[in-house]
Image: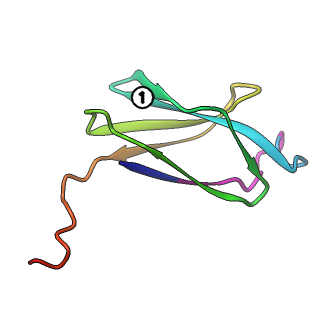
Amino acid sequence: MINLDIKCFFHCPSLYLKISSVFKLIFFSNKKQVNKSDVFTIQRDELITKEYTFDGNSELEVHLLDAQTKQQLDKTVIKQNKDRDLGGLL
């Protein structure tokens, strides 16, 4: 399970004067698109959390796009951690 915390600071000049904007996440594995999010709105300085699964991929590259212009605003690589929380058993 992937929990993505997304906060929109609106530092991008094209977004700066907006109170909110719409975004979309695109997921890639081995340079191939494997998933995409719904379009979502973030208010200025709002923090939202989105949950996704790895769907059998051990590493994903996630691109944050402006849903209206399709401009890539940011990207990150997420690596799956196979370690499990053992609840203090060790």
Q: Quadrant for residue 58, please give it.
A: top left
**Main secondary structure type of the part rendered in magenta:** loop
Question: Is residue 50 positioned above or below 24 on the image?
Answer: below
Pick the residue in front: 65 or 47.
47
In the visual, does 15 lie left or right of 1?
right
In the visual, does 83 lie left or right of 36?
left
Residue occupying the point 54% across, 35% down: 63
Residue occupying the point 87% across, 50% down: 19
Residue 7 painted magenta: yes
- Visual colour scheme: rainbow
In the visual, does 55 lie left or right of 21?
left
Residue occupying the point 79% across, 55% down: 44
Pick the residue in front: 44 or 73.
44
Residue 42 painted magenta: no
Quarter of the picture holding the C terminus: bottom left
Badge 1 amino acid: Phe
Residue occupying the point 25% across, 53% down: 81
* Residue where numbered disc 1 is placed: 28
Segment tinted magenta in the rendering: 5-14
Residue 50 image point, x, y percent = 53, 48
Q: How many marks?
A: 1
Residue 26 image point, x, y percent = 52, 30
Question: Is residue 10 positioned above or below 37 on the image?
Answer: below
Q: Quadrant for residue 37, please give it.
A: top right
Q: Secondary structure at mark 1?
A: strand
In the visual, does 66 lie left or right of 80?
right
Residue 71 image point, x, y percent = 69, 29
Q: Residue furthest top?
A: 32
Residue 79 image point, x, y percent = 31, 46
Residue count near mark 1 (Cα–Cα under 10 Å), binned few <14, some 14–19, many ≥20: some
